[in-house]
Image (cartoon, rainbow, N blue to C red):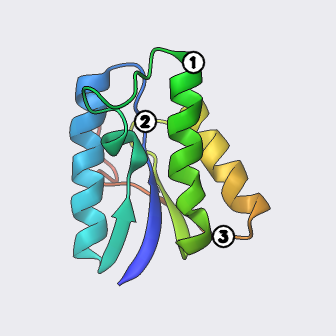
Amino acid sequence: MRRVILESPYAGDVEKNLAYARECLHDCLLRGEAPIASHLLYTQPGVLDDNKPEERKLGIEAGLAWGSLAEATVVYTDRGISGGMKFGIERAGKEGRPVEHRKLYEGKTE
């Protein structure tokens, strides 16, 4: 399986963004990939609070630390590109990791 970092929005409409991120995970798995979606993992209750800037930064850094093991960063764009996603895309570029943009709902509106 190809290891990928999954980028999708978290902040904003968190409930819809979490549901979307789960769909993105499913899409990755169906493509034969092993995705890491740190925004789903580290924002669970009792782990990190995304509303606290220092904890948000810690979560982003922890997720991106997996970058040296990932073969690509996949960016799901149906719900836009957030600031955190932009940071992940920039980081992938600096580390020489390919970035792939994807949509789950090509031609459809949410």
At 53% across and 47% down in the image, what residue appears? Answer: 62
Helix, strand or loop status at disc 3: loop
Q: Dot 1: within a 10 Å radius of its alpha carbon, few (fewer than 14), some, or many (20 or more) residues?
A: few
The amino acid on which the numbered mark 3 sits, given as a three-letter code, is Arg
Quarter of image, res 93: bottom right
Please give the residue where the numbered disc 1 appears in the rendered image. Answer: 53
Left or right position of 17 against 52: left
Q: Dot 3: within a 10 Å radius of its alpha carbon, few (fewer than 14), some, or many (20 or more) residues?
A: many
Q: Earlier in the sequence, mark 2 or mark 1?
A: 2
* Residue 110 appears in view: no
The amino acid on which the numbered mark 2 sits, given as a three-letter code, is Pro
Q: Dot 2: within a 10 Å radius of its alpha carbon, few (fewer than 14), some, or many (20 or more) residues?
A: many
Please give the residue where the numbered disc 2 appears in the rendered image. Answer: 9
Please give the residue where the numbered disc 3 appears in the rendered image. Answer: 97
Disc ID at residue 39:
none
Left or right position of 64 against 15: right
Q: Is residue 80 above or below residue 97?
A: above
Labels 3 & 1 near each other (Cβ < 8 A): no
